[in-house]
Image: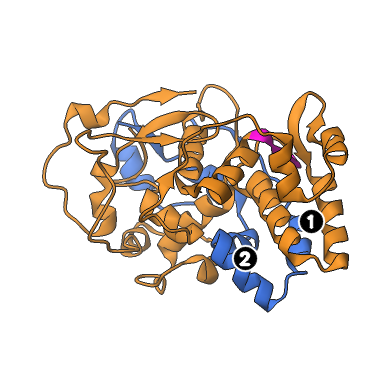
Chain colours: A blue, B orange
Amino acid sequence: MEFNMEPERTREAGNTKKKMRVKVLENDLADLRELGQKLREVQRTIFKNRYGNLLELLEVNVQIHAITALVQYMTIH
Amino acid sequence: MRCFTFCDFQLVPTFEEYAQILDMPIDKVIPYQHLDQYISMSTLVAIMRLPATDLEDSFICEDRKGFSLSFLAEYLHQLGEEKDWEVFMDVFALALFGIMLFPKTERFVDNAAISVYIAYTTRRESPVTAILADTYLALNSCNPKKKTRMTCCLPTLFVWLASRFEKRVFGIKCPVESVKQQRLGVKSKDEWSQYMAWQQRSQLVYQCAKFLNVPLIGTKGCLNYNPVLTQRQFGYPITGAPTSCCRTSFISI
């Protein structure tokens, strides 16, 4: 993912940050997704009441590039 | 204080947003306290419904305490075939805590994750603060000088980021459904600020009693949390410069 912010960045002198090399621990969720499919509608509702949105979060396709790009915008105040 | 700075505005994942993404209540619950790290065999037997002798062998793998995912997956398949859904749901949630919410190493459910799970199920301690603390700690460990490895709950962070671009999510209860399959593309600066606002709340957590900093306890350490600079994220103007006390960071690992 890229952000169109180059003009602003170059205008501010000394704001050229070194790119952070970040490796992300990416656990393979395929096994758990497959197991989650076993739950039927009734059980999914019970699970949601007990543990919130975990089943929905399990199905989110995380774009690792988006996360590593986001990290570049980290600043300390 | 660490936050994401985009041109002239700051964004941070907040406690309220994470609670909404995870759909876990924040009112009238206590945050994760990091008590009782020792997990007794009888507690494990009660969750897993397996004889202690079977559990002891698989609980400690290569000097680490915890279960491997392959062990849990195999057991879950067995429970699925037996249609024992009560135990299935408990063990499945335990696996999700270890692999998705509190990852430490690949395909391994760590002792710390199990302790958060037990705290949630027995003492109703909310894991939201622990997830947020771990996310901040992972972001803190990022250093331009060396290659770092980030270990935190990625789906929540991604949903938090992706929900910024989704116009429809404004005002609805949980943004997960709409961003599940979303792919982020190139965004211009205007689009960024357009989609900033996500939720409006009348109450925010930004103080702990009289103290300006809110302590957050995670599985890997604890740190202070102070979203005073990001009131704009919730649609409030910032009325003055934050005091130096608000900006002092405290991290203990």
| Chain on which label 1 sits | A
For label 1, the residue is A31
On screen, residue B38 above or below B184: above
What span is colored magenta in the figure? B106-111
Mark-to-mark CA distance, 1 and 2:
18 Å
Q: Mark 2 belongs to which amino acid? A: Phe
Q: Nearer the viewer, residue B16 or A11?
A: B16
Secondary structure, mark 1, is helix
First in sequence, mark 1 or 2: give its number.
1
Secondary structure, mark 2, is helix
Left-right relation of A5 to A50: left
Q: Classify the position of the C terminus of chain A by image quarter.
A: top left
Q: Mark 1 belongs to which amino acid? A: Asp
Q: Measuring 78% from the left and 63% from the top, which residue is drawn there?
A: A34
Q: Quadrant of residue A22?
A: top right
Q: Quadrant of residue A17?
A: top left
